[in-house]
Amino acid sequence: MTTYIFYALLSALFAALVAIFGKLGLENVDSTLATTIRAGVMFFFLLFFSLATGKLDLNLNTRFWIFIMLSGVAGALSWLFYFMALKNGNVSTVVAIDRLSIVFAVLFAWFIFKEEVTIRTLIGALLIVAGAIMVSLK
């Protein structure tokens, strides 16, 4: 198994735990407050991790800062809407709809990076959409 697949599987595992722990924590709390607290916890955890592994280097170019900041804003909006959805929705439905991000990422990657979209990619994307619909229907 290549390293990036291993990391992607770990990411999927912890993303599932985000949904479960988030839903449990949102019971009597505003979703915006919960998202803010979560972001703070992540900031300190990642700061400690970066310091502990010697990977904290802030001497980077302007392009890096622009796109990482845009990524941060996009991530914050994603978390904000995700927690708003979790507050009132079923975990399985919210997670299924959220995973449509894969389809959006494939489209953006094709448009921005000119990544190849094969018939297999299209079928996979359609299956993701179909799966999200099937999980979401009552």
Image (spheres, rainbow, N blue to C red):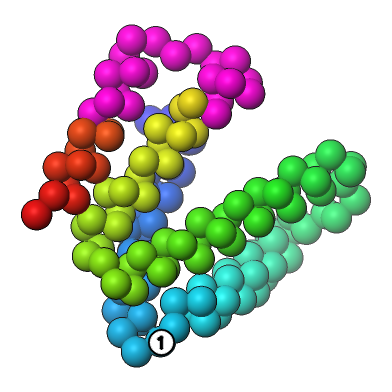
- Residue under the point 46% across and 27% down: 106
- Residue under the point 22% across and 57% down: 92
- Residue under the point 58% across and 21% down: 111
Q: Position of residue 100 (x, y in %)?
A: 36, 41
Three-letter code for the amino acid on which mark 1 is drawn = Val
Quarter placement of the N terminus: top left
Secondary structure at numbered mark 1? loop
Q: Position of residue 20 (x, y in %)?
A: 29, 68
Circle 1 packing at 10 Å, graded few (<14), some (14-19), many (20+), is few
Q: Main secondary structure of the magenta part?
A: helix
Q: Nearer the viewer, residue 3 or 107?
A: 107
Q: Position of residue 87 (x, y in %)?
A: 34, 74
Q: Give the side of residue 109 with respect to residue 26, left or right.
A: right
Q: Nearer the viewer, residue 137 or 13?
A: 137
Q: What is the span of residues highlighted in magenta in the rendered image?
A: 108-127
Residue 110 visible:
yes
Residue corresponding to mark 1? 29
Quarter placement of the C terminus: bottom left
Q: Give the side of residue 76 with respect to residue 95, left or right.
A: right
| Residue 118 falls within the magenta-colored stretch | yes
In this view, 18 is above or below 138: below
Q: Position of residue 18 (x, y in %)?
A: 38, 65
- Residue under the point 41% across and 69% down: 84
The quarter holding residue 82 reads bottom left
| Residue 51 falls within the magenta-colored stretch | no
How many numbered marks, from 0 up?
1
Residue at the left extreme of this rendering? 138
